[in-house]
């Protein structure tokens, strides 16, 4: 899959990451939230660079992250976890592929299941498509709390608890720059699992995005 050419066409709304200055409360957070959703939902093309860490009951690791999305096509590079060196997860309408630094590859239709079956990491990739923008996953029950600026502060959805710890200003947009994501008690497909407790910390250092 070729991502570079498409990225050259991005309207770069942001580069670099600076914590957004403290903003005064808005008069109507609920109305601001509705406007934010209308503005953010069309965004399906981006490049994210940052860092992530994961911790289960038995182990933990840290890694650098690069995530390129162009609509339904994704390329996620995870560099440095557990001595694996470099993992690349790609997804398009043909399915998902995971490739390691030794060029071993695995394939499946669902990228979440592929990552879980090959590494044991249960990451909510479908949810992250929206959570990184500060949005809930559509058509999925959720409970949420807004901050005084009409942005998501906490979200509980699909068995995950998400806290939006910091936002940063990218062009005219406030987007999450630090997220804490936690799940307890269930493994893949809701089955009990001893190692199902999972904490994910995501720091987004750089965005390039377009609607």
Image: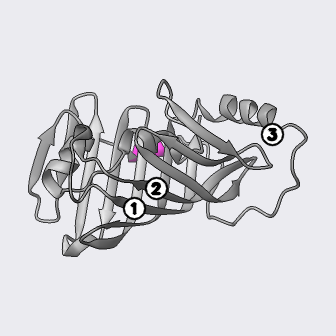
Residue range (magenta)? 4-8
Sooner in the amino-acid sequence: mark 2 or mark 3: 3
The structure residue drawn at horizontal position 74% and vertical position 49%, both measured from the top left corner, is: 147
Residue indicated by mark 3: 29
Is the residue 170 above or below the residue 16 in the image? Answer: above
Crowding at mark 2 (Cα within 10 Å: few <14, some 14-19, many 20+): many
Residue 61 x/y as whole percent: 31, 72
Image marks 2 and 3: residues in contact by CB distance under 8 Å = no
* Rendered image: mark on residue 93: none
Task: Give the labeled residue for mark 2.
Answer: 181
What's the CA distance linking mark 2 and mark 1? Answer: 6 Å
Q: Are marks 2 and 1 in contact (CB under 8 Å)?
A: yes
Residue 6 is inside the magenta segment: yes
Horizontal and vertical percent for residue 89? 26, 50
Secondary element type, mark 3 = helix
Please determine whether, in this image, residue 72 is positioned above or below residue 132: above
**Residue that numbered label 1 is attached to:** 199
For residue 39, which quarter of the picture?
top right
């Amino acid at each position: 899959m070729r991502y570079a050419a498409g990225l050259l066409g991005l309207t770069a709304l942001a580069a670099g990451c600076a914590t957004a200055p403290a903003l005064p409360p808005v008069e109507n957070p609920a109305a601001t939230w509705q406007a934010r959703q209308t503005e953010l939902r069309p965004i399906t093309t981006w490049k994210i660079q940052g860092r992530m860490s994961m911790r289960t009951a038995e182990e933990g690791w840290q890694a650098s992250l690069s995530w390129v999305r162009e609509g339904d096509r994704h390329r996620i590079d995870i560099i440095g976890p557990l001595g694996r060196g470099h993992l690349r997860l790609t997804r398009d309408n043909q399915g998902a592929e995971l490739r390691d630094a030794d060029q071993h590859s695995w394939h499946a239709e669902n990228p979440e299941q592929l990552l879980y079956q090959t590494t044991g990491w249960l990451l909510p990739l479908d949810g992250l498509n929206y959570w990184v923008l500060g949005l809930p996953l559509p058509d999925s029950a959720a409970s949420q709390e807004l901050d005084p600026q009409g942005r998501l502060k906490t979200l509980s959805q699909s068995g995950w608890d998400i806290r939006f710890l910091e936002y940063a200003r990218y062009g005219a947009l406030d987007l999450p720059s630090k997220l804490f994501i936690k799940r307890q008690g269930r493994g893949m497909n809701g089955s009990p699992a001893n190692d199902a407790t999972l904490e994910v910390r995501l720091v987004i250092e750089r965005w390039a995005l377009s609607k």
